[in-house]
Image (tube, rainbow, N blue to C red):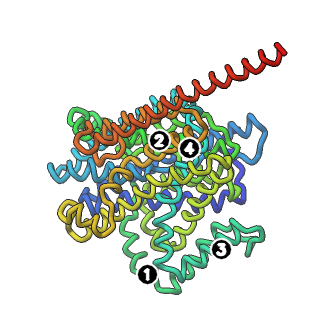
Amino acid sequence: MSLLNIKWKRGDLAAYFGLMTNNLTNLLTMMGLLIFVVGIPSEMVYGRIAPAFGFAVLLASVSYAYFGQQMIKQTGRQDVTALPSGPSAPSIFTVTFLVIMPVYQTTQNAEFAIQIALVWCFVEAMILVGGSFLGETIRKMIPRTVLLSCLSGLGLLLLAMNPMLQAFEAPTVSFIVLLLIFINWFGKKPIFARIPTGLLLLIAGSVLAWVSGLQSPEAIKTSMESFGFNPPGIHIDSFFNGLPHALPYLASAVPLGLANYIFDLENIESAHAAGDEYNTRKVMLANGLSSTVGVILGNPFPVTVYVGHAGWKAMGASIGYTLASGITMFIVPLFGIGAFMLAIIPMTAIVPILVFIGVVTANQVVRETPKVEVPVIFICLFPWIANWALTMVNSVISAAGTSAGAIGIETLLHKGVYYQGLVHLGNGAPLASMLWGCIAIFAILDKPLRGAVAAAVGAILVFFGIIHSPAVGIATGSTLMFVYAYLMMAALFVLKHFLDNRQSVEKQQIEKAEKLSKSSQ
């Protein structure tokens, strides 16, 4: 069974449009940030970075399609859904604003800035490669409820929340698209059932957008300027040139690499919960090696297992959707047609699909969680909510041309904005969400020693600035309070363990005494 023999299922078309448009949005966002925000020359972005970016995603997509085909062959099942592949969206912003922009602003050397970023991406890839040998063990150590709850926060807050806000900015288009999703994908009796729902959504949304005057013919004309042929080339020399100078910028690569590692674990666990048991090591290796190949070709952004496996499976997708999306992600930058596609198909027709994926991802944890563990779901959401709110607050403050420090933390507090709390809870959300989920579930299930380990890990993460801190570094000042707080939690868990043991011994002694008393009678 080869990739050439993949059978295209009805649900693959809808899933393809959803995954492809999401990935395409990330591609266009990346290009827009580099060209219009940072100031990297467009010929470097269109001619080198974007094609390498697309090829890295394609390579991961081919790997996932192969893994899916192997599962079909080994199990005989025809309901296998391949993992979705895509770029790591947080990495796009992190590497752009924490690496490329400051280097470029300091040196005005775009080539040098990209060289540093390539080293950064390589470090991320190596974290995935090294972690692949521990991934299966860690996935089994962390309760499923925690992994799925963390993923639900990612789905709702990072994938679905902003698209939902965008939907409410163009209700004459998005409301109809959302209703079609509710009827056809959530409901039992679809409307216009002969038309694949993904295609129906794009047609309806596009027609409504053009009729409403939300799309411009001028945008189509402008988008054609990006047409061209841009094959990826070998740029390993850029990586080696950046290697001696990259160390000061690698601090952010470690926590984000760990975060991407957790994303992969969560998405693999989501696939397991849906019935598709992929090998964690193989998937992690595929991501790490795909990102490394991207670095060699000149792409500074890592790839990952994309969120939403449960949603694509709910659509009836199989293998074809992820492979077709990967091919599209390569062809679009290869010929420079991404801007043209979005000039024809409006984002208002696309974003409701992301809302659906976010909701289905969150719904999976509700279905899979035992009743006693349900509180863990909501506890895991808090860091994600704070992360989203912190991003919004910082964006508003930045748009006003000021900063939280200039406004004053006390001033914000008097207005009901707990900015310090947002900073501490929101930073490191992927790991903080998992950490608090573990603490909560081990407390609920009365596993105090495992809870003590989780709390101790929290103290270590805080001490090195990986969570609850805006920057990586040894904890000082107020941040040390979190180290002490986690150690106090660990101590309480240990105390609970000894109290439980003593209570158990006392109970056994009472039962033994009662048996002796009965036997003597």
In whole angstroms, how far apart are the C-alphas of marks 1 and 4?
Answer: 48 Å
Q: Secondary structure at mark 2?
A: helix
Residue type at mark 1 is: Pro
Say which element carries label 1: helix
Q: Label 4 crowding class (10 Å Cα cut-off): few <14, some 14-19, many 20+? A: many
Query: Which residue shows up at 41% across the image and 42% down it?
Result: 294
Q: Position of residue 404 (x, y in %)?
A: 23, 62
**Front disc: 1 or 3:** 3
Tag 1–tag 3 contact (CB < 8 Å): no
CA neighbours of label 2 inside 10 A, class few (<14), some (14 to 19), many (20+): many
From this viewpoint, which residue is outermost toward the top?
520
Task: Please tell me whether mark 1 or mark 4 is closer to you in this view.
Answer: 4
Residue highlighted by disc 1: 217
- x and y percentages locating residue 241 in the rendered image: 23, 36
Residues under labels 3 and 4: Cα distance?
32 Å
Which residue was labeled with disc 4?
A: 146
Q: Which mark is residue 174?
A: none
Residue at point 72%, 55% (across, down): 9
Kind of residue at disc 4: Val
- Report whether 356 appears left or right of 163: right
Q: Where does label 2 land, which residue? A: 435
- Who comes first in sequence, dot 4 or dot 2? 4
Residues under numbered marks 4 and 2 in contact, where contact means CB atoms less than 8 Å apart: no
Residue at coordinates 27% horizontally, 33% vertically from top-left? 240
Residue receiving disc 3: 180
Mark 2 and mark 3 lie on one chain; the one further toward the N terminus is 3
